[in-house]
Amino acid sequence: MSKIEINHLTVDYTEKKKSFTALKDVSFSIEEGEFVSVIGSSGCGKSTLLSILEGINTPTDGEILINGEKINGTGTDRGVVFQHYSLFPWMTARKNVAFGIKQVNHSASRSERYRIADEFLDKVGLEQFKNKYPSQLSGGMQQRVAIARALAMDTDILLMDEPFGAIDAKNRTILQELLLELWEGASPRKTVVFVTHDIDEAILLSDKIVMMTANPGRVYRELKVPFDRPRNRSELVQTKEYNKFRNDLLLLFYSDIADKIGGEEVVL
Amino acid sequence: MNTLANNLTAVKTDKKINSELKTEFLKRYFRVVHGLFFVLLLIQFLPDRLTTDTYAPYGIWFAVGVEVITLIFSALIKKVESLNLFTDIVGFIYGLLIAWTLATAKFNLLKAALFPPPGKVFWQFVDDYDKILVNIQSSVGIILQGYLLALAVAIPLGLFLGWSARIGNAATYISKFLGAIPPIVYIPYGIALLPTFKSVSVFVIFLATFWPVLSGTMSGVMNVEKKTIDSAKVLNVGKFTMMFSVILPASLQQIFIGCNQGLTVSFVLLTSAEMIGAQSGLGYYIKNYSDFGDYTRTIVGLIVVGIVIVIISFIFNTIQKYLLRWKQ
């Protein structure tokens, strides 16, 4: 049995009397301890898919099973990192993390929660910034706190919705490596669903890449990423295999987009 | 040679530090405000034109007191901006006192019965000290009771109604309608309903605060970002935590706008109500003595009302700043 099974998921939105299909018959599965990236151009429904996994949205049709059980709303088995607004601006970094811990572990005392929070803030390199409010932290630091919270909550599954999408290139690289290190170093490894539009990020981090296509959102391809772990970016990007895999992926990505544009031109 | 050169530079830097200290000292203690203080003292030597006692010594003692406080604060306040602000305010007070002294005691330009000299007002203030304190207590007590009661009811209710209004219902419109009615028109109904002036006042202040705080809270809740709520949802927060640990702080800024409005209206209402029907309170103090033609006490009352409001809004702003310290 797979950790997560997505079965024939369809989502229709109705906005101003216009119906719009965000996802159409999406099915794939994710194994325990697997790092899966969902990539695709904007509007392909990858964030919609994740919001259903999070339990914020409900599908029009189809279902998602976790450990064989159908999900119904949010759950303590899933930790989430958004692109923005994961943190509560009125709580310090430490309180944000401790607040997350409290929601999954009601029995932990306040000092226990703070101890765990500090431990994870140390892991993401923010020991100096524990008592700062999110508005006093850079975007990259805020995402570190969000990651620390998701990890400190110690959920089986981690859902990440373009967590580094709004971070500048240099810090994004640093954060990717931090996430890779933390995830690879943990045992057992968590099951991760990671939404991104960055192909390099997807290859570096994932065991499997699910490529989606827009209008309506469907699964276009599923690809295993064949590189050994632990991975090292600077070594990996120099190999022939990496470059071949990356080029194939790009080709797939653009052929899909070219198909779409061609199709529309025919209509015109 | 080398040591000599070193010594020379050391002497130079010493001198530099010395002169810096000197300018710093001058900047701190030699200000226009102190000049105004001496002007205020000097004009006391002009001959009085008033036939009645001007109580000039009381005025001088007051000015000296203010000057001492100013000097102490000049030594204590570190930030230049804050010191500037402080001395500007004191300078304004001195300027006012100078103009006031000249216009009354010294040149008798104003009607003496309506405009007593500053010394006399200060003397009256000291003389009436206990009476004023009782009236402050009465007014502030009524405001606090009505105001805090209104906050205790309006904020939780606003959170609840705002939360259900996010889904869309009539609560918004109902509160808009009821809030649009000026609270003073409830007074006749309150008088019919309640036994004492005090309870009517508390009731009216309650209403005056209740509606702006309720609608402020509701609109705050309705404007909370969906993403903030989503990130609380994915943490699996319970209903109570969602309401008081997420929705409440997220809408705090708008709640404060309502609270501020309620406070302003409360003061206007209470002082006016006290002038009409009360036997105590600051509004009563002013109205009562002006009825007897005692304009010294009327001015004392006006100044005390001003001071009380400034202190209360200072406390209010300090609380607001503290609770919203996480905002940039």
Image (cartoon, coloured by chain):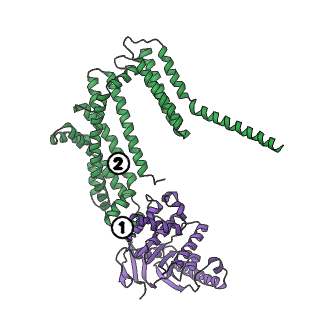
Chain colours: A purple, B green
* Residue at numbered disc 1: B237
Residue A264 on image: x %, y %: 52, 78
Q: Chain of mark 1?
A: B
Q: Which residue does the image show at 51% across and 73% down from the upper left? A: A42
Which circle, 1 or 2, is nearer the viewer?
Answer: 1
* Residue at numbered disc 2: B258
Number of numbered discs present?
Answer: 2
Whether residue B60 is visible here, answered yes or no, is yes
The answer to which of B95 and A268 lies nearer the viewer is: B95
Q: Residue furthest right?
A: B1
Whether residue A15 is visible here, answered yes or no, is no
Residue A258 on image: x %, y %: 57, 79
For residue B310, what is the image quadrant?
A: top left
* Secondary structure found at label 2: helix
Q: Are marks 1 and 2 on the same chain?
A: yes
State the quadrant of the N terminus of chain A.
Answer: bottom left
Q: Which residue does the image show at 82% across and 44% down from the upper left? A: B2
* Type of amino acid at the residue the image marks with label 1: Val
Up/down of A231 relative to A166, above or below? below
* Secondary structure found at label 1: loop
Q: Chain of mark 2?
A: B
Residue A222 on image: x %, y %: 51, 85
